[in-house]
Amino acid sequence: MKKINFTSQTDSELYKYLKHYCLEVPETDKGKLIRAEAVKSLTSYQAMLDGEEDRRVKVTFHKSGDPTQGEYVFIGLNGRGYQVPFDTSVVLPESVVKVCDDAVVTTFKQSTASSLGQIVHDTFSHKLYPYTIIEYMDEEGMMAHDEKLKK
């Protein structure tokens, strides 16, 4: 992504960038743009994108056995949504995939220890959206992947 100096942009250009990146427009009660917050938001978003654009991964999501799961994994990160089918290889930014590491289901099972009659709680945790990283994509791999999609 080309570096943009947001401090030199007009208010209308800042609005345009905020809308383009689906970021919240910071406004006063009277609807006037809060310029400092807009510049800060856009600058931090651009910095996040810079790290994300270079590092993409080919990944496959697997069903976890949760009966409430649909046909897709829906991942939201920084105002962008990704709808990814299960058991299909896709290329995503690594930071989007890593969000799924925090989607964990914890279940508790109660059991009784026979000799003392004590109640014991066992804890089980598993990922809601388990995945396998197939490969890290460099620019050459991305171009080959894009060509395959065009066919």
Image (cartoon, rainbow, N blue to C red):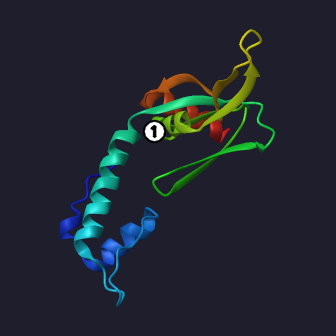
Hey, which residue is sitting farthest right in the picture?
Answer: 67
Vertically, is 4 above or below 96? below
Q: Which residue is rendered at x = 53% and y = 37% of the image?
A: 102
In the image as oriented, which residue stretches furthest toward the left?
8
Q: Residue furthest bottom?
A: 30
Report the side of 57 relative to 70 (left or right): left
User: Which image quarter is the C terminus in?
Assistant: top right
Quadrant housing residue 33: bottom left
Q: Nearer the viewer, residue 119 or 26?
A: 119
| x, y percent for residue 21 | 43, 61
Q: Residue at x 51, y 40 (%)?
A: 99
Against 84, residue 38 (above or below) is below
Report the residue that reaches farthest toward the top.
115
128, 97: nearer the viewer: 128
Residue 124 picture location, percent across and down: 65, 25
Q: Quick one: SS at disc 1?
A: helix
The residue that label 1 is drawn on is 95
Residue drawn at the location 21% of the way across and 61% of the way down: 5
Q: Tell me where residue 140 sits by quadrant.
A: top left
Of the residues shown, which amino acid type is indicated by label 1? Ser
- The residue carrying pointer 1 sits among few (fewer than 14), some (14 to 19) or many (20 or more) residues within 10 Å by Cα, namely some
To which quarter of the image does residue 31 belong? bottom left
Q: Residue at x 53, y 22 (%)?
A: 135
Q: Is residue 102 above or below residue 30?
A: above
Badge count: 1
Which of 52 and 148 lies nearest the eye of the viewer? 52
Image coords of residue 100 (percent x, y): 56, 37
Instruction: Note whether 79 is above or below 87 in the view shown.
Output: below
Q: Position of residue 139 (x, y in %)?
A: 43, 31
